[in-house]
Amino acid sequence: MVLPSKRTSKVKRIVTFDGDLEEAFTPQSITVVLEDEIDCSRGDMIVRPGNIPKIANSFDATIVWMAAEPMVPGKTYLFKQTSQTVTGQIDSLKYRVDVNTLHRTPSPELQLNEIGRCAVTLSQPIYFDAYRRNRTTGSFIIIDRITNATVGAGMISDRDSAKQPLAAWESSDESQSASTGEVSQVRDDERVARFGQKPATLLFTGLPSSGKTTIALAVERALFDNGRAVAVLDGERMRRGVNKDLGYSVEERSENLRRSAHIAKLFNDHGLLCLAAFVAPSQSVRDRVSDVVGKDRFFVIHCSIDESVRAQRFASLKSEAAQALERGASSEYEAPEAPDLVLDTSKQSLTECVEAVIALLKDKQIIR
């Protein structure tokens, strides 16, 4: 995909003075020929469609000041990032970092060789990644418009001043509830009596193409047909709506699950069964979901699958989003330490998997 036009194509040739190449890498000098006629000029970016960088004109950054004249928020500078240069300003200096102790202290300005966390606003949007994810697209230099001297260098942070999507898991749900002063007029036991079930969240976890969503939807159908109140949360569907702003980095996958965990808890608080299908790659993040939902009503179902079978299934997928998720998840996935149920989706049929899940719910006395 070519940004900012968002036109897509494929690489036809990689041309050099000595002939065409099959692949190229830094520091080679090449010409990329695409299959389609697409306008792509200096400053534009070529990316994978499933791994698009952020676009914004404001962000937070750690800035190292390199000029004798101090940095004062509000002054207009030139910001050079990759091969593009735009005007902008440093809106505010949030704090200065002591290079010896790493302590943060308030400061009205940055002096020579000082480091600070700043909020930056540019005159036009740019495409960028967090510095720790991509040093090339996540770094920039600051140029004085009068002298043309480089006065600073910056590293874009994961969180920006306009929005902070990667909220902390540790936020106290109890404190948030207490602050509203609202208490439901429907008691939990009344919901149990009405629905004939206890609320619970079943997390279907496993690698991409292991059958998580397929099984969750089939279980939903079976429970619904038996008069149960049930809902499915799926990682990819969440990304098309509530979590549309999130990508596929480790932090963003964790945030996708964090938000979904709170939605699952909301379903449970209203008496519903929630079937959540997510990769949930690590034990630590699954434990966090358990803390949010409640350990007494949280159950983990591990969708295990033979790797050769999974590879065949995944090869048929054309979703760039799925492929982006696969690149990160496959190398980082940790199987649950003590799942409540293990489904071997390469050997068990869909019907057998559904029956096993229903049996688990009955064994845990969630349904009768």
Image (cartoon, grey):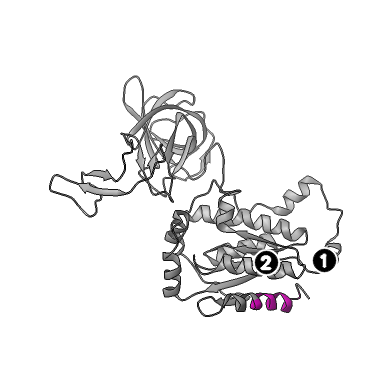
Q: Quadrant of the N terminus?
A: top left
The part of the chain drawn in magenta is: 355-365
Instruction: Give 147 or 306, whichever is nearer the viewer.
Output: 306
Q: CA distance from mark 2 to mark 1?
A: 18 Å
Circle 1 residues within 10 Å: few <14, some 14–19, many ≥20: some
Q: From the viewer's side, name the closer residue of 313 and 201.
A: 313
The answer to whether 139 is drawn above or below residue 334 in the figure is: above
- As helix, strand or loop, the secondary structure at mark 1 comes to helix
Q: Nearer the viewer, residue 236 or 316?
A: 316
Question: From the viewer's perspective, is residue 303 above or below residue 135?
Answer: below
Residue 307 lies in the magenta-colored region: no
State left or right for residue 229 relative to residue 94. Answer: right
Local crowd at mark 2 within 10 Å, few (<14), some, or many (≥20)?
many
Instruction: Residue type at mark 2: give it.
Output: Glu
Residue 312 at x, y percent in the picture: 42, 70
Of label 2 and label 1, which has the lower sequence position? 1
Q: Is residue 166 above or below residue 199?
A: above
Residue 331 in view here: no
Where is residue 16? Give x, y as percent: 17, 46
Please name the residue shown 57% across and 40% down the image. 163
Q: Is residue 300 left or right of residue 17?
A: right
Residue that lies at the very extreme toward the left in this rendered image: 18
Circle on res. 192: 1
Q: Is residue 253 above or below residue 362?
A: above
Q: How many marks?
A: 2
Q: Is residue 362 magenta?
A: yes
Rendered location of residue 361, percent (x, y): 71, 74
Amino acid at circle 1: Val
Q: Position of residue 359 (x, y in %)?
A: 69, 78
Q: Nearer the viewer, mark 2 or mark 1?
A: 2
Which image quadrant for residue 311?
bottom left
Residue hosting label 2: 220
